[in-house]
Amino acid sequence: MITTIRNAKIYTCNEDRPWAESIAFSGDKIIYVGPEDACPKSDKVLDAGGRTILPGFVDSHNHPGMVCQSSWHITLPWVDHVDELLDFVRQYAKEHPKEEVPFLYFEYYPTTLFGEGSPTKELLDTAVSDRPCLCQDFGEHLHWVNSKMLECMGVTKDTPDPVPGLEMFVRDENGEPTGWVKEFAWIHFADKLFEAIQWEAPMTMTPELMEEFFEFTKTHGITGMGEGILEGEPQLASMAELDRQGKLNLYYDGAVRFWSIEDLPEKIAELKMLRDKYQSKHIKMDMMKLFLDGTNESGNSALLEPLVNDSTGTNYGEIKMDTKELKECFLLCNAEGVDLQIHMVGDRAFRVGCDAVESAQKEANEKGIRWEIQPIFAHCELVDGEDIPRAAKLGITINWTCHWAGGYFGTQAISLLGPERWHRMYRIKEFIDSGALVAFSSDVTTFYELRRRADPLLGIQVSHTRMDPEFPLDPAICPDGKRTPAGQELPLDVLIMGYTLNAAKQMHWDDLMGSLEVGKLANMIVLSKNPFEVDPLEIKDIKTEAVIFDGKALFGI
């Protein structure tokens, strides 16, 4: 059966034919894109009423597993003072006794809440001390825990940090944990915590637990997705079951996390096992994931110059690997045919990443080994100007989270990086201008974020305007309200391309999706308004009114 949609403004993301009036598809493939008067004879004709049609969005870095595991978290009110936060925690604990809620997990507190200081377990104990309690910061890389939680985890001054300097417990001068935790270090002790309180959080993946996430992606036009970190086999099994039930409605590319060259072979073997068990038309596994450094707001990103709050001038942040080890990781991934996606935030991390890719490619070439994999550098918030052109030269894909571009994480990093470095972060337009492939994503990790920040149209607006509608920057720091540096606003065509075809290229799906062309999948969305015609500050209000996935209408048509 041939279906035709006419009377539409179709933005194809095909450079040879960027706009069309009509599109036809049969089965799951597009068979025609062009003017209405040349459309093939059709069994079914749909009138779009002049509305805009885009390719289905491809969110190239998201965390469905982490989001679903957060379903039991408690949302904090947005507060300006620590006392307000403690009052809320204290009242919540009073209204929900230990027998009802054995473990209190609150999100989020502003990363800037403690200024240049850090929270302590003793302070949180004043609000709740009868059970474990955790407060997660807005940047999601810092956690504040009470004494009871440290006790239940068995964490003392003699407990080694999971990854010293990166995944770690902040300690006082005597080595005692202060109650401030960086980079989810507590997760390594979660089993011991739950055993101590004889309770387990509802974090085990089931199709029912994950259903809300994929209902969100469906209704917001997301028809392809790249994984940030797969949260274990049950996540993949649940997604496969949702796919069998017709509730997945997107193409998914999974990623398995590793920590070092020592555990990389084991983790690649795990990826291949998962691929053999679950790979299907809609699910594949071909990425490894590494966290090379931390975050600027946490003070553990890897930097070329020291942190400004370090009086010794010796604190350059933290990095997980040197160039030599990372090169070996790239060579092994290339030999095994799996891409390597790296979380990197600081300028030293970016340079080490580029040096490792360059060295690995050189060695492969000298040995007559074909270079086949795609290095993916996620975030790249602070990059030295001399290194920006290297991404294009080395074939590195830059993955950028669009809704961060207006200053989502606030100004906390100024106290650590200094104003000069803070004001030159997020120079994504320069990567694009240099010819690098840049793919866009939402990178949300909780239901709180999913519901408020994961709509691609919000991300497009924020990176187009460099202003955050929910968290505007202090005008004393950015007088015009725009995140510095000036001139980094991204054009709409670039943003739509980054959320469609470029994202598909990152996952080697560009022969299937990302643009509306003959022979590609009939994955498309119908919008309530044309993003090229509305006020830039109203792009986020555009609704996805219909979605066609694999040639079938999911809703709206």
Image: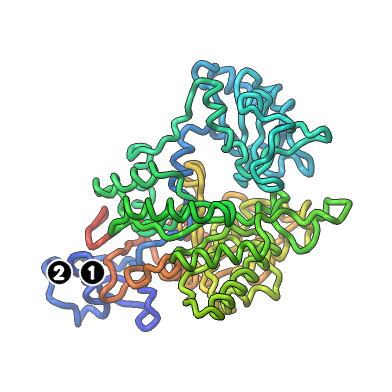
Residue 4 position within the rendered picture, expressed as x and y whole percent measured from the top left: 19, 69
**What amino acid type is highlighted by mark number 2?**
Ile
- Relative to 296, residue 55 above or below: below
Task: State the residue in front, 353 or 391.
Answer: 353
Place residue 35 in its image quadrant.
Answer: bottom left
Look at discs 2 and 1 and give the one toward the viewer.
Answer: 1
In front here: 362 or 554? 362
For image coordinates 63% across by 66% down, the residue present is 353
Residue at 38%, 41% in the rendered image: 234
Q: Earlier in the sequence, mark 2 or mark 1?
A: 2
Give the residue displayed 61% in from the left and 36% down from the top. Answer: 186
Q: Residue furthest right?
A: 311
Residue placed under numbered mark 1 in the picture = 29
Q: Hey, what amino acid is under mark 1?
A: Lys
Q: Secondary structure at mark 1?
A: strand
The answer to whether residue 546 is visible is no
**Numbered circle sitting on residue 2:** 2
Q: Seen in the image, is 533 located left or right of residue 313?
A: left
Quadrant holding the N terminus: bottom left
